[in-house]
Image (spheres, rainbow, N blue to C red):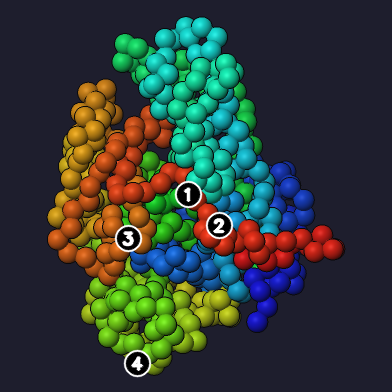
């Protein structure tokens, strides 16, 4: 079979103007970035579409094909005659050159131009990086130039960022050699920075500027918060983001419109594409397929408890993606046993899937369809075990072949999702916004993760008390934890019991308007593996990129 990039290069893309026209957009409504990419500048006000959220079980290291299934589902809906639009996140260069590779789908279910989307695209992540680091530069310059705001250099909270996995930048010293005030600094990956979250949660350009001004950069020596607006830099930051805030329009291999915009990670940020992208898709199509990062305990929880609250939206159906291989891994199978029939491991791993179904159905009260990403190694007995188990859990499982067959391989899933989305449902939440911060975190652990509750370090408790005293107690909570387990321990697979999640730190995001609870050993700046994907990516003598997937 051809590689992902070969499949993408062999497809016949439509001019982006034709894709825009299929959504009712005129040429003057878009800003072209060549023949196959555009920014949407005319955003619709009405929202009419049915919204489908695609999430997943706790994934393996390489992911379970959630984006691929999302794309194949949308193409499948199109083959059923539906007026459909995708709303996906943008890839980050860190994973592209790291372990996971690209995030434009795979096989015959991709968004294109694949190499552009996975690399620089329309420059959104570069603009976010620049805006973030402009604030850092102005902050350090202010301290160096006399520090009129009396900022305490030891209590600077806002961090620099880079769109790359680079563990060497986790802990650094800036200002050495008299080139500024020497202090400890920490880098985050761009996908985890607050400016990314702000861009994705802003509902307008004015809201973007307001949120940028509310970023807490640190404290003065009196213990008072210092904000970006105190440095008078929010306007300049907004100027760097005035184009980045506009949603990006591309297409699938089969010509289905796709809006790809915003890219926060779900394990260390809020994991959802931009509200403006979702609003735009909801106003231009009758059906919208969107995704949330990593497993349903992370991405879907944040989509439902945070994004839906801020945006005033709710999904009509939730799709949980899984694979037989991943379920066997959750059941204790080693890599050697993943491609063989292993019903014992599968049965032990299925409870992970059951928990995610249970959460979507009983916590959030939404219809659920399970999309099983099919592999050639899946046996009839394993398929039967999954179908039988999912039915007992109160959902329907559909094995999809979108990787090999594109939209045709997603028709059955599309039909099941459309049927489920017609059921009347009303979104419930995992916690009450008005509850104290500790209780909100505790409710997430109990209701979503299935744990016994949360434990808090002394520092976390102090910061929670401080946040509530400063008026931030009613904000949503974003838990930063491992994606590989329902718990905060990556080694606890399937559906662990009797665990508690230890919250070691609390970060108040005044501009993004949420509280981050840092659990376990999660890093805000990922590192590279022993053999990163960068070793396999190259440009041939004709200038064609190879090895990207």
**Residue 526: assigned label:** 1
State which quadrant residue 118 falls in.
bottom right
Give the mark nearest the N terminus, 2 or 3.
2
Q: Which label lies toward us, 1 or 4?
A: 1
- In the rendered image, the residue lying farthest to the bottom is 380
Q: Secondary structure at mark 1?
A: loop
Q: Which residue is mark 2?
A: 98
Give the mark nearest the N terminus, 1 or 4.
4
With respect to residue 513, does 371 lie above or below?
below
- In the rendered image, the residue lying farthest to the right is 542
State which quadrant residue 495 falls in.
bottom left
Using the numbered discs, state the Cα–Cα distance from disc 2 to disc 3 in whole angstroms.
19 Å
State which quadrant residue 548 falls in.
bottom right
Q: Is residue 295 left or right of residue 142?
A: left
Do the residues under discs 2 and 3 have CB atoms within 8 angstroms? no
The C terminus appears in which quarter of the rendering? Answer: bottom right
Q: Which residue is mark 4?
A: 381
Where is residue 190? Give x, y as percent.
Answer: 52, 42
Q: Secondary structure at mark 4?
A: helix
Whether residue 342 is visible here, answered yes or no, is yes
Give the camera-side residue of 206 and 358: 358
- In the rendered image, the residue lying farthest to the front is 177
Do the residues under discs 4 and 2 have CB atoms within 8 angstroms? no
With respect to residue 548, does 117 lie above or below?
above
Q: Which residue is mark 3?
A: 490
Q: Which label lies toward us, 4 or 2?
A: 2
Do the residues under discs 2 and 1 have CB atoms within 8 angstroms? yes
């Amino acid at each position: 079979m051809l590689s992902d990039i070969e499949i993408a290069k062999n497809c016949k893309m439509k001019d982006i103007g034709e894709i825009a026209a299929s959504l009712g957009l005129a040429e003057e409504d878009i800003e072209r970035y060549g023949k196959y990419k555009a920014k949407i500048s005319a955003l619709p006000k009405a929202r009419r579409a049915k919204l489908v959220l695609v999430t997943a079980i706790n994934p393996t290291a390489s992911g379970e094909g959630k984006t691929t299934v999302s794309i194949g589902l949308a193409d499948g809906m199109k083959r059923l005659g539906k007026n459909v639009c995708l709303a996906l996140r943008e890839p980050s260069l860190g994973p592209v050159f790291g372990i996971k590779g690209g995030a434009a789908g795979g096989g015959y279910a991709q968004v294109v131009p694949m190499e552009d989307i996975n690399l620089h695209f329309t420059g959104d992540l570069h603009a976010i990086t620049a805006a973030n680091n402009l604030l850092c530069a102005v902050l350090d310059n202010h301290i160096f130039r006399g520090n009129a705001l009396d900022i305490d250099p030891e209590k600077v909270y806002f961090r620099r960022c880079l769109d790359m996995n680079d563990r060497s930048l986790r802990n650094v010293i800036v200002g050495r050699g008299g080139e500024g005030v020497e202090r400890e600094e920490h880098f985050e990956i761009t996908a985890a920075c607050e400016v990314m979250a702000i861009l994705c949660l802003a509902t307008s350009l004015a809201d973007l500027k307001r949120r940028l001004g509310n970023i807490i950069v640190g404290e003065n020596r009196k213990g008072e918060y210092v904000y970006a607006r105190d440095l008078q830099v929010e306007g300049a930051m907004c100027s760097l983001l005035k184009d980045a805030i506009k949603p990006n329009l591309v297409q699938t291999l089969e010509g289905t419109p796709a809006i790809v915009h915003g890219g926060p990670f779900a394990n260390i940020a809020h994991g959802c594409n931009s509200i403006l992208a979702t609003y735009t898709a909801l106003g231009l199509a009758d059906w919208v397929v969107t995704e949330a990062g990593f497993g349903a305990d992370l991405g879907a929880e944040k989509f439902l408890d945070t994004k839906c609250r801020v945006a005033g939206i709710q999904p009509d159906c939730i799709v949980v993606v899984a694979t037989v291989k991943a379920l066997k891994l959750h059941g204790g199978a080693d890599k050697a046993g993943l491609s063989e029939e292993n019903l014992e491991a599968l049965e032990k791993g299925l409870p992970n899937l059951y928990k995610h179904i249970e959460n979507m159905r009983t916590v959030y009260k939404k219809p659920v369809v399970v999309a099983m990403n099919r592999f050639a190694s899946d046996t009839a007995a394993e398929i039967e075990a999954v179908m039988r188990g999912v039915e007992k859990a109160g959902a329907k499982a559909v094995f999809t072949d979108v990787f090999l067959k594109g939209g045709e391989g997603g028709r059955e899933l599309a039909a099941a999702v459309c049927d489920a989305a017609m059921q009347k449902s009303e979104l419930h939440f995992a916690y009450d916004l008005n509850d104290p911060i500790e209780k909100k975190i505790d409710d997430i652990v109990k209701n979503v993760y299935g744990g016994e509750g949360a434990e808090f370090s002394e520092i976390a408790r102090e910061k929670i008390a401080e946040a509530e005293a400063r008026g931030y107690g009613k904000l949503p909570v974003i838990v930063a934890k491992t994606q590989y387990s329902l718990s905060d321990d990556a080694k606890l697979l399937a559906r662990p019991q009797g665990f508690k999640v230890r919250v070691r730190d609390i970060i108040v995001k005044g501009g993004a308007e949420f509280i981050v609870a840092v659990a376990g050993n999660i890093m805000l700046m990922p590192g590279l593996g022993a053999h990163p994907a960068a070793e396999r990516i190259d440009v041939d003598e004709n200038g064609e990129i190879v090895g990207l997937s």
